[in-house]
Image (cartoon, helix red, strand yellow):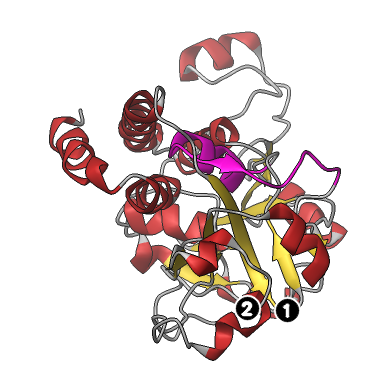
Amino acid sequence: MRLRNASSRRCLVLWPVLILWLGLVSCGEPRPVTYTDQQLRIVSLAPAITHVLIELGLQDAIVAVGDYDDLAPVNTPSLGRFIDLDLEQLTTLAPTHVLAMTGQAKLPQRVYQMADQGRFVLADTPYPGNVEQVMDSIQQIGQALGREERTSQMVREMRYQLDAFSELTADRERPSALMLFSLDPIYASAPNTVNGELLRIAGGRNVVVETKVTAPVYDREALRALAPEVIFLMLPGDPPLDGPDDPRLDSLRGLGLPAVENGRVYLLNDPTIVHAGPSVVTTAVSMAVALHPDLAEPIAEVFRESP
């Protein structure tokens, strides 16, 4: 995590006796500021971060988000695209914290300069590539906000639940499955992703082979060759499927796909389904129950026994 703390300043050289008398920290060390929930003013630049804040009960502290944040409280202003933020509006909002989750695309350099000038605390966490990194990002958000105890409890519960799901599916036959994020064109999820790992935890086998890209594209013939037994349509906010004749399934018809022929195409439309945050638990549950319907009650028992 790249953390720039507004309170980390170079202090003045003072007389040694005065330093001891005041009990000040040594020069150059951070002097963290503690904010109450009511004092926090947070800019969240990733929906997964927004989800963490909501789970922490800090939704009222969110003063702005980036574009395409479908989890933000109603009427929360947007600062625009991630790489082209409205820096004038950012200054006007006077946030205490700016929280980001970046991959290849980085924040504008000016944002880092503003943090160095003491405008706000900036926490820039890498976009998670696996479930453990999701846990790490949640912990880093808690550290940046001074809410480590609350995020540690969240992570303990998530880890307990996912480990328990993995044990439930460990010795089961694994149906071949395909996760699709788009049907036109057809974008799938590779194994080396968060959702690829969740599919394994849920007791499925990804028909997509290991690739350098996280979302490979398939034409109809390539899709036919995959022949998945189960298909998950990961389309946040989409209306439920209208039976086997739903027009959204047109691109999957006529290929002899076992999943289509046997009615095992499942729509996962929770708004959080594609976000690498606390929703990884519910995503794993949705997949596990679709793949192994008899696990519904054992999974419910896991939640009842969670720490």
Where is residue 231? Give x, y as percent. Answer: 54, 60
Q: Quadrant of residue 45?
A: bottom right
- The amino acid at mark 1 is Glu
Question: At 65% from the left edge and 23% from the top edge, which residue is drawn?
Answer: 29
Q: Element under label 1?
A: helix
Q: Is residue 194 magenta?
A: yes
Question: At 57% from the left edge and 80% from the top edge, which residue is drawn?
Answer: 249
Q: Nearer the viewer, residue 120 or 182?
A: 182
Question: At 42% from the left edge and 46% from the top edge, which residue is drawn?
Answer: 284
From the viewer's perspective, tell me whether residue 5 is left or right of residue 62: right
- The amino acid at mark 2 is Arg
Question: At 64% from the left edge and 42% from the top edge, which residue is drawn?
Answer: 128
Answer few, some or many: residues within 10 Å of disc 1's Cα (few below 14, many 20 plus, some between 14 and 19): few
* Quarter of the image with the C terminus in it: top left
Q: Is residue 136 magenta?
A: no
* Quarter of the image with the N terminus in it: top right
Q: Quadrant of residue 209?
A: top right
Q: Which residues are magenta?
A: 193-212
Residue marked by disc 2: 253
Residue marked by disc 1: 88
Where is residue 168? Give x, y as percent. Answer: 32, 28
Q: Nearer the viewer, residue 204 or 16?
A: 204
Q: Nearer the viewer, residue 151 or 163?
A: 163
Q: Element under label 2?
A: loop
